Image (cartoon, rainbow, N blue to C red):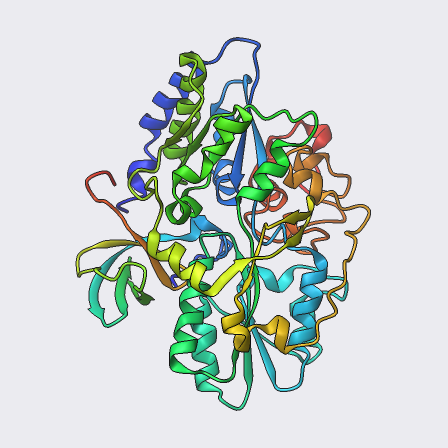
Amino acid sequence: MKYVDEYRDPELARGLAAEIRSLVTPGEVVRVMEICGGHTHAIYRHGLEELLPPEVELVHGPGCPVCVIPMGRVDDAIAIAETEGVTLATFGDMLRVPGGRGSLLEANARGADVRMVYSPLDALELARQEPERHVCFFAIGFETTAPATAVTLLRARAARVPNFSVFCNHVLIEPPLRAILETPGLRVDAFVGPGHVSSVIGTDAYRFIPEEYGRPIVVSAFEPVDLLQSIAMLLRQRVDGRCEVENQYTRVVRREGNARALAAIAETMEAREDFEWRGLGPLPRSALRIRDELAAVDAERLFALPGARIEDPKACRCGEVLTGQLKPWECGVFGTACTPERPLGTCMVSSEGACAAFFSYGRLRLPREARVGA
Amino acid sequence: MIPKPERCLTCGDVAVAARVREVDGLEAVIAVGDLTERVAIELVPDARPGDVLLCHAGIALERIEEHTA
């Protein structure tokens, strides 16, 4: 398949693995954080860690939008779904995330009308088809997904659809990166940057990482050859004594991003004062809310939401996994009390979550004594 | 959108490259494998049949430059 096969070529991958080995200094470990959950998934799925020398350690970052949504926001979504005459629509993975009162799927089983959609535009269409019901879209995602919500909000306004709203939980990539970079004792030497977020915000958005924090970053696509090339580019920067933003995903990502997408987001949404992140706590200006001009479609103004802050289960260590301080298998409940079928934490819910990805693809590579659920 | 059951749709990597078959106002009919799907093209308004678009959650995010693809 074009645009896929050429980036999975085993010969190219072996060549890049050899290049990576030639760029490391024996015994000197370089810790590379892949920010995006999609990269985490690809790394485990394709067994890329097996191709890397022990001097390159991959650390998983906070870039799974399902994983960072706190339990209180799930409870808010359940409160909307349980309102008489309301249909709540959202992406499939969000349905299984446990809140303080169970998941949306469980709310659906209790009688709430919860439906899975592939696009916010599908939710808007649902509102048009069922004018007797109010349809609320539970929006999550980083800057990759926010444009779809923005376009939907603009279409809803233009078409004056009266029975549609959005519960906005879009988050931004820069604040959690700053939070991680400011973590005392941070042990991350370089970053693999998210590919599709960057198609929207552009590579210039990451200049603060080398300029303020002295770490290089390479924006990467998602296939195995792409990721290996990005790691090689990071190591080449170290060898050359450079520290900058580089772009491996040139076939899609530009320095300035997509101006139309950014304008659509800016027209419909604005930064919140703060937003609670799983694992990182409240971060200032780290998420988007719907602008006053579109108050009529803002579910936070239309519904009485509990807005409670709910602590994660004590056994759940998603926060440490999300910030790269803990490997999935080092969590005490990984693969036992917490599995993809019955997740305790969000990192096990989403297939892009580090725990679910490792559970699916990586656990048989662990030393026998560390294997669980196998 | 194109079903990809092993992936979480919210994640950026589920954006797919798809070729435009036809353009119909603010939407394009795209082809991925044997399937066709409609995507919104407000963000890539000059999309034309034959273009390859990066599509995510029902909209086209960007045009893919084929000479580097």
Q: Residue at x 53, y 38 (%)?
A: A35
Q: Is residue A223 above or below residue A368?
A: below
Taking the image as drawn, is residue B3 in sight? no
Furthest residue to the front?
A: A293
Q: Is residue A257 above or below residue A150?
A: above
Q: Position of residue A55 (x, y in %)?
A: 54, 17
Taking the image as drawn, is residue A59 in sight? yes
Q: Residue at x 61, y 46 (%)?
A: A356
In the image, A332: left or right of A74? Answer: right
Furthest residue to the bottom?
A: A132
Report which quarter residue A254 is drawn in.
top left
Q: Is residue A184 above or below residue A23?
A: below
In the image, A95: left or right of A211? Answer: right
Q: Residue at x 69, y 70 (%)?
A: A106
Residue A76 vs residue A230, the one in the foreground? A76
Q: Position of residue A182 (x, y in %)?
A: 64, 32
Report which quarter residue A235 is drawn in.
top left
